[in-house]
Amino acid sequence: MSAPIIRVEELTVSLNTDDHQRNIIDSISFDMFPKEIMGLVGESGSGKTMTALSIMQLLPKTIKICGGSIWYEDKDLLKMTSREIRTIRGNKIAMIFQNPRMALNPLMRVGDQIARAVCLHCEVSSEKSKSMAVELMSQVGIPDAESRARSYPHQLSGGMAQRVLIAMMLACKPKLLIADEPTTGLDVTIQAQIFKLIKEIQSEIGVAVLLITHDFGVVSEVCDRVGVMYAGQIMEISSVIDVFTNPKHPYTQRLLKSILRVDRKSDLDTNKALSPISAVFDSPGCRFASQCDCVRPECLWERPKIYTDSPGHSVYCFNYSRDNK
């Protein structure tokens, strides 16, 4: 297997208030390899977006990285200067945000915004960048691209705006593309088109994709591997096939049971609702322990170490690591 393009090691991110520090990302580790699509899945508040913003070095001022490392190829991003980070952000590592209109300048025509990205990263003339912008818009499936290039963001539908943002990312020819819930607020048909486009881009230019989502259906259709997060901790990492056929962590199992299917009755105990994620962030052990049917005493005070069940399938759970010593 080739070397990872991104390696996150023991990343810890804290939210600092006047009287309290809370670890909203708790010592997470994972690798991403060239040309793969990896999903990061979990319910709202589990830390998926904060993980992405940590990689991009775009965290809000009240949130700080207080431990770990993020390796891009052979460089630790957390030890780089702001100037060094800017040479990588948007160039080698690009991000598609949930709300494309928030990422686009409302006072600037979309074609000019793409052309500006082309100029920054491709070192071409202004005229050439404008023609390249139209080509990129056409490449991502925007009809009548030359005319649409003269539009402002508010004149485009949500799906079109997202395609413009993807075109802007393509101008940089990144090695890693982070897509944070890229179809939020779009109807099902447009969602399918955007995910198809992301897969086509991944196949054509060989970019690795980190797809952040709460939807296991999207994971099954798009991703090669998946990491399952809960309350700032990674619970399980495996291939998509393994996570559906042989889920290990009790939280992963519960998530899968919650998926409604027309061909069977759900066996999820609806009388046992999960506690709000915000209520378990200060737990020193596994943050799912207080809601787990398989809990052990040590789960409440000790963070489980990683247990590798098979190549590529790892789980953080004492029910495997202790039983298999």
Image: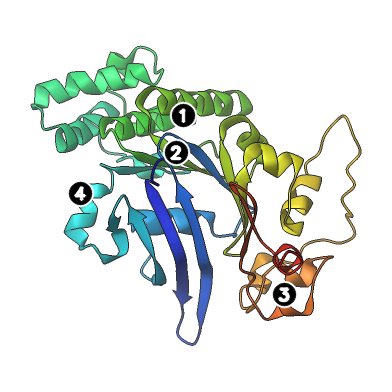
The residue wearing badge 4 is 87
Q: Are marks 2 and 1 in contact (CB under 8 Å)?
A: yes
Q: Residues within 10 Å of mark 1 (few under 14, many from 20)?
A: many
Mark 3–mark 4 distance (CA, rounded to whole Å): 42 Å
The residue wearing badge 3 is 299
Dot 1 falls on a residue whose secondary structure is helix
Q: Name the amino acid type tagged 4.
A: Thr
Q: Earlier in the sequence, mark 3 or mark 1?
A: 1
Q: Residue at x 78, y 53 (%)?
A: 254
Q: Residue at x 90, y 34 (%)?
A: 264
The residue wearing badge 2 is 209
- Does residue 287 appear in this view? yes
Mark 1–mark 4 distance (CA, rounded to whole Å): 24 Å
- Does residue 160 appear in this view? no
Q: Which mark is residue 198?
A: 1
Relative horizontal placement of residue 164, taking residue 123 as reference (left or right): right
